[in-house]
Amino acid sequence: MAFELKQVVPWGRTMDEYILMFSLSEDDLNKSIVGFGDGPASFNAEMNSLKRNVVSLDPIYKFSRAEIAERIEETRSTIIEQTSKNAEQFIWNEFSDIHTLEKQRISAMNDFLSDFEDGKKEGRYIAHSMPDKTTFENGQFEIGLSSHFLFLYSQLGLEFHIQTLEEMLRICHEVRIFPLLNLNVEESEVLQEVITYFNQSHQIDIIKVDYEFQKGANKMMVIKKKHL
């Protein structure tokens, strides 16, 4: 089935959020980083302005800036309405209220849109659907980041998660995934099976992070190949 933009609910996060979600140190930020499913986050744009190296992969990057902007506008009110209805599922520290959240998300997505065309030309935004094999070399990136993609969409199934992680781990020295919950804000159904599958050949750590917007969503997985 062809990937269609109408399937996407774009929602962008900032560099500050990435730093907290993935416990990115100053040293980490100077490493080569690839983001899987970054969507309209401003992380790449903000990192590029600081002369740091990030490549973002997402199937929505095959669409034009105007098409993505239109889809953001089509869905923003629905997302805000749903978040407002389920406000008790969130911790309102980082964002004081729903209006502050909307303002920051729209700001992040506008930063992304402003950077998108230049970033595509520079090879920083690449249209790609996981788990298809990428064109990158083995171990090309020091860190891979998966924000609100793996585990969150547990309905994609165990095989999808395994194949996607295998490709991530082929091109990255380590992969960090946040959050570890599904869309119902419960531990992802495939989490333990993924850990079991990769545990023999990889070091897997579950680490608490200094970020919690959805209640209970305050842990990331760090996975890297064991040194034998």
Image (cartoon, rainbow, N blue to C red):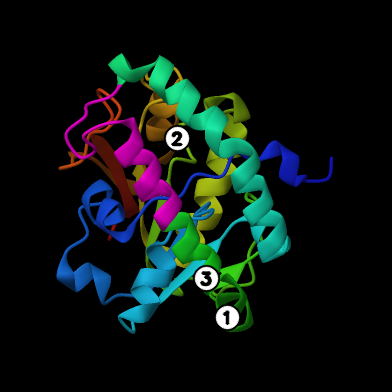
Task: Give the residue at x 60% y 37%.
Answer: 75
Quick check: 119 above or below 204? below
Q: Residues within 10 Å of mark 1 (few under 14, many from 20)?
A: few
Quick check: 88 above or below 96? above
Q: Position of residue 33 (x, y in %)?
A: 39, 69
Can you identify the residue that label 2 sits on? 197
Can you identify the residue that label 3 sits on? 114
**Which label is found at residue 118?**
1
**Which label is found at residue 214?**
none
Q: Residues within 10 Å of mark 3 (few under 14, many from 20)?
A: few
Q: Position of residue 11 (x, y in %)?
A: 49, 44
Specify start and end residues of the magenta stretch as a single range: 90-107
Q: Is residue 158 magenta?
A: no
Q: Is residue 94 magenta?
A: yes
Identify residue type, mark 3: Ser
Residue 59, visible in the rendered structure: no
Mark whose residue sits in front, 3 or 2: 3
Q: Position of residue 109 (x, y in %)?
A: 48, 56
